[in-house]
Image (cartoon, grey):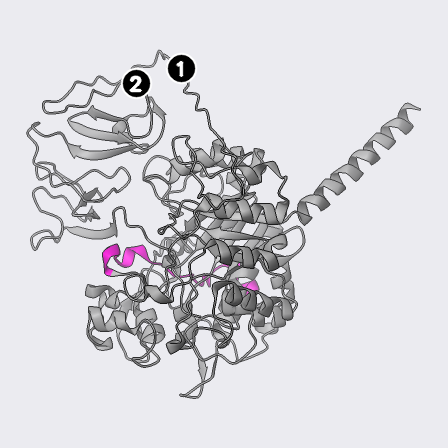
């Protein structure tokens, strides 16, 4: 009897487990991207994790890791991942893992997204062959005219006429990257062979000689450029796509996401007559090889890991391509490599093909409506989503909160199609039950008529999961525990209040650093036993520090969560503070001696010392010892392209 009962119990448990798994697989996804930066990214993620059970999403995409990332399994550091979560110690690994655990315990899947616009834009090639490759009347050519005058005048000095990002973003080459081809990896080679064996178009040609961080000469015009990105994965003989899966496993992630937006690749490696139309088959092969590499590594390292991808709105169309976007890419992947596409879109590993149906325009000067009667945001969104459905391709709809990145608001605001209430309602009426995703969890509405993130998320959630689902009445919490106030048009009016419990101060027998308040420092001296919330300021060893999130017993000079605001006035040091925030990198001081590899901020940028120096101002003629890096506090936006 006991044996029979035990067997029945086990059988019941197995049935229940299978049922729950089936339900989980059928549950629509309501997802939001979270743009990470070391200034407030960790505090935003903490706020989401603290409210995991009540936020109106059930998936979060952490963005963006670099395509050429390096992660050694078991190393537990984000140092070479490029996520920009923190700038010292384990670069935020332990903190990030704890937030992932909390979110997933509250019913929210966490994915790590690789790529995005900046980590996929090759400024030189994008300028010369995408924006400037089709004559002077293309929609973004004005950037070349305004910032350089002509295509030939676009150089690295003016960031190739600021086509990847506008000039006010203060970007340098260090802010960009490309998806590499790690030809020494056996997994990559296996994926490559598979793609070649099933190629349905032009003969596949790969380009492993285009190595991030190395010089590359354009065979078309013989110009030599530095390829965006870093060759650390080459030095360490690692496959970044394999390391992505290892990282996901060690962080306990539910999935990974490949956000592929290499427009330059399609435009540079196109094939056809000089007047078009052209094929973008080489980009189909590169993208499919990347996805196959990730798929093979998931199957061998972490079989439960989900794989998602962000796809272009025009990617599901089968009609002729005239350049300028990633049209046909996902259609051809599905046609030639259905098992790769379906691994992403369906089944236990299916994280979803997520369509970036935003940044659309109704400017018919550039034929940006699919046809004369399909010009509103909802009409265009439904048109592009239908192109996937008509070709039997499973895909999920995307929304952009606030002001679209395209067309540029300072150039063509009248043809922007922002997400307003009437348009969201029209999209949800067709696409809502299938779920969807949006960019970005903390992106401001930007205009009174545009929907804020909480208002939009509540409606997307209710349409997909049901209006009675508790989390669909929740709000996106602001860092520090408060919640965003939804707009008056929101159909859900429940406000979720977060009560923050601050741990009591603890004592330790370990010796603590001795600090004294430096002359000129008005802020109280930091103490090991003090508890500090976001925004708190302290003085430590003559410098003023600001806490980015709750902290106790974190020495300010160790970096995050503390940001160094520079020397206190009156302490005898001469400091040239950086504008913006560089996440804990100290400001340059003329009285400090720096050794090779030291990093500072100056004039809004990071700089690295090439050898010992003192008194050489970064960026000056005498400051060649300093190598200029990324911009501080740059709001590097996820941008798209005209459809």
Please provide percent x and percent y for residue 172: 25, 57
Please provide percent x and percent y for residue 400: 45, 55
Please provide percent x and percent y for residue 141: 29, 74
Q: Are marks 1 and 2 in contact (CB under 8 Å)?
A: no
Among the 4 quarters of the image, the one containing residue 430 = bottom right
Q: Nearer the viewer, residue 388 or 607?
A: 388
Labels 1 and 2: the sequence-earlier one: 1
The image's mark for residue 142 is: none
Residue 144 as seen in the image, left or right of residue 358: left
Let me know if residue 190 is in the magenta part: yes
The residue at the point 43 percent across, 73 percent down is 368
Let me know if residue 433 is in the magenta part: no
Q: Nearer the viewer, residue 261 or 231?
A: 261
User: Mark 1 — residue?
Assistant: 504
Quarter of the picture containing the N terminus is top right
The residue at the point 17 percent across, 18 percent down is 516
Quarter of the picture containing the C terminus is bottom left
Taking 162 as reference, is 525 above or below it?
above
Give the CA distance from mark 1 to mark 2.
13 Å
Q: Secondary structure at mark 2?
A: loop
Residue 306 visible within the image: yes
Q: Nearer the viewer, residue 227 or 189?
A: 227
User: Mark 2 — residue?
Assistant: 528
Residue 168 as seen in the image, left or right of residue 181: left
Please provide percent x and percent y for residue 311: 51, 62
Question: Which residue is the extreme one toward the front?
Answer: 488
Residue 238 visible within the image: no
Q: Secondary structure at mark 1?
A: loop
Q: Which residues are magenta?
A: 167-192
Categorize mark 2 by other alpha carbons within 10 Å: few (<14), some (14-19), many (20+).
Answer: some
């Amino acid at each position: 009897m006991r044996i029979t009962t035990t067997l029945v119990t086990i059988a019941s448990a197995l049935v229940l487990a299978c049922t729950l798994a089936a339900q989980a697989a059928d549950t629509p996804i309501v997802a939001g991207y979270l743009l990470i930066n070391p200034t407030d990214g960790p505090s935003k993620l903490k706020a989401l994790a603290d409210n995991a059970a009540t936020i109106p999403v059930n998936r979060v995409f952490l963005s963006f890791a670099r395509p050429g990332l390096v992660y050694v399994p078991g190393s537990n550091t984000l140092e070479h991942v490029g996520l920009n979560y923190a700038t010292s110690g384990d670069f935020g690994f332990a903190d990030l893992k704890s937030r992932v655990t909390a979110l997933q315990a509250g019913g929210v899947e966490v994915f790590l997204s690789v790529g995005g616009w900046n980590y996929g834009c090759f400024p030189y090639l994008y300028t010369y062959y995408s924006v400037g490759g089709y004559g002077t009347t293309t929609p973004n050519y004005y950037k070349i005219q305004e910032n350089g005058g002509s295509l030939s005048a676009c150089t690295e000095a003016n960031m190739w006429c600021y086509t990847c990002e506008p000039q006010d973003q203060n970007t340098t080459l260090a802010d960009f990257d490309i998806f590499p081809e790690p030809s020494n990896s056996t997994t990559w080679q296996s994926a490559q062979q598979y793609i070649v064996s099933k190629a349905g178009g032009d003969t596949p040609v790969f380009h492993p000689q285009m190595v991030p961080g190395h010089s590359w000469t354009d065979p078309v015009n013989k110009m030599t450029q530095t390829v965006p990105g870093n060759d650390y994965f080459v030095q360490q003989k690692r496959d970044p796509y394999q390391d992505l899966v290892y990282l996901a496993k060690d962080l306990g992630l539910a999935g990974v996401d490949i956000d592929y937006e290499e427009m330059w690749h399609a435009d540079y490696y196109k094939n056809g007559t000089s007047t078009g139309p052209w094929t973008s088959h080489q980009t189909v092969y590169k993208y499919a090889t990347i996805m196959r590499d990730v798929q093979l590594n998931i199957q061998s390292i972490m079989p439960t890991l989900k794989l998602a991808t962000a796809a272009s709105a025009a990617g599901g169309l089968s009609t002729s391509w005239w350049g300028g976007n990633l049209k046909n890419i996902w259609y051809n992947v599905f046609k030639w490599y259905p098992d790769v596409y379906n691994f992403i879109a369906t089944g236990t590993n299916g994280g979803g093909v997520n369509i970036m149906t935003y940044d659309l325009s109704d400017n018919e000067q550039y034929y940006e409506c699919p046809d004369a009667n399909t010009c509103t945001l909802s009409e265009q969104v439904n048109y592009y989503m239908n192109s996937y459905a008509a070709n039997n391709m499973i895909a999920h709809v995307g929304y952009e909160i606030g002001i679209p990145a395209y067309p540029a608001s300072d150039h063509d605001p009248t043809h922007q199609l922002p997400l307003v209430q009437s348009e969201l309602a029209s999209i949800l009426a067709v696409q809502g039950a299938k779920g969807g995703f949006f960019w970005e969890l903390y992106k401001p509405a930007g205009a009174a008529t545009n929907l804020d993130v909480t208002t939009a998320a509540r409606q997307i959630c209710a349409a997909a999961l049901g209006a009675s689902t508790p989390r669909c009445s929740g709000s996106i919490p602001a860092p520090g525990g408060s919640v965003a106030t939804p707009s008056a048009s929101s159909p859900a009016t429940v406000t979720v209040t977060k009560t923050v419990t601050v741990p009591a101060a603890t004592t330790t027998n370990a010796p603590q650093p001795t600090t004294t308040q430096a002359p000129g420092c008005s802020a109280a001296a930091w103490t090991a036993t003090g508890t500090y919330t976001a925004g708190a300021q302290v003085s430590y060893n003559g410098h003023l520090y600001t806490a980015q999130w709750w902290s106790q017993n974190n020495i300010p000079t160790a970096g995050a969560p503390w940001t160094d605001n520079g020397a206190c006035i009156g302490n005898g040091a001469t400091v040239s503070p950086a504008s913006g925030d560089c996440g804990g990198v100290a400001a340059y001081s003329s009285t400090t001696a720096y050794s090779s590899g030291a990093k500072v901020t100056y004039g809004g940028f990071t700089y690295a010392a090439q050898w010992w120096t003192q008194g050489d101002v970064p960026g000056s003629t005498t400051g060649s010892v300093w190598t200029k890096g990324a911009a501080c506090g740059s709001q590097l936006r996820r941008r798209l392209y005209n459809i």
